[in-house]
Amino acid sequence: MPGRNVGATGKKEQAIERDTDTMKWNKKYTYPTSVRSLINGKRHYSIDNRKLPSVTTILSATQSDEKRQSLANWRAREGATRANKIMNEAAVRGTSMHTYLEAYVKGTGHLDLTQTGLQANTMAQQIIEKGLGDLEEVWGQEVTLYYPDLYAGATDLVGIYNGAESIVDYKQTNKPKRREWIEDYFVQLAAYAMAHNQVYDTKIQSGIILMCSKDNLFQKFEVSGREFQKYKHQFLRKIDQYYKIVSDSKGCADTKNGE
């Protein structure tokens, strides 16, 4: 069901101040600072003088042929110009929505009166009203997580959600999603959980996706227990696949250089 449209921007800001009075922060972990960089056009994180591939870089490199073909078919249907426009608009809208939600959790408020900003703010309000009510404790947000020597990434929020230690990610979407369409999101959450558990000796076994469409339809997806463990195993296999791809590509480059 489409969400309620909050009125004037000033009222939005007042609502933020009231709601965040009860937002509980517990900065029990020190998260690393990092610098993002591109290597061959792929996102990496510089941590302890080592460049680690991002979770999204690994997922992209190990994408199935079926998924690659599906994306290619969509681009062919839309045409390159329109497809790029749709993707760019979604990226800008998603960034604005994330900024609004980050400000809400901090309790600082955020104001963006551009057309895209106002749309994103309304989407964020849906997530606040329908998704963040079960957020009991915040350990950190927009935090860099890494698994030593393997990979890194940044998650939107870590803390206690509905009584469980959880990784929480916000997602914008052009249209509502079915659960079976977003398995990569669950794998992404599992990767972040494994990194957090390894470095901070936690036992995160829960992932939450809080999603809103550009038409203000809110969806929440939760994954935990055995299902979450399944996605951890999937990502471990993808790590092996990714580093084999990297090793093979280096071998080809060395061969060409030798020739």
Image (cartoon, helix red, strand yellow):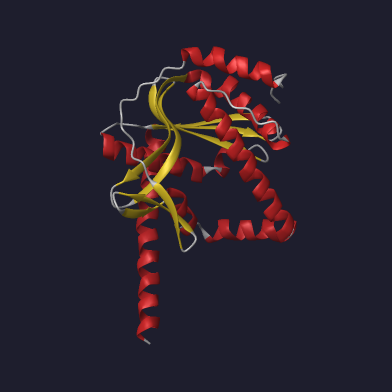
Q: Is residue 76 visible?
A: yes
Residue, x 46% and y 64% (percent of image)?
A: 40
**Where in the figure is residue 165, as x and y percent of width and height?**
37, 26
Q: Which of 196 and 237 is in front in this view?
A: 196
- 2 to 174, vertically: above or below: above
Q: Nearer the viewer, residue 101 or 114?
A: 114
**Where in the figure is residue 258, as x and y percent of width and height?**
35, 84
Residue 160: name its quadrant. top left
Q: Can residue 178 be seen in this view?
A: no
Residue 72: name its quadrant. bottom right
Residue, x 65% and y 44% (percent of image)?
A: 90
Q: Does residue 143 appear left or right of residue 99 in this picture?
A: left
**Where in the figure is residue 208, as x and y percent of width and height?**
48, 31
- 21 to 104, vertically: above or below: above
The quarter of the picture where the N terminus appears is: top right
Q: Does residue 179 appear left or right of residue 122 in this picture?
A: left
Q: Nearer the viewer, residue 93 or 236?
A: 93
The quarter of the picture where the C terminus appears is: bottom left
Residue, x 40% and y 82% (percent of image)?
A: 256
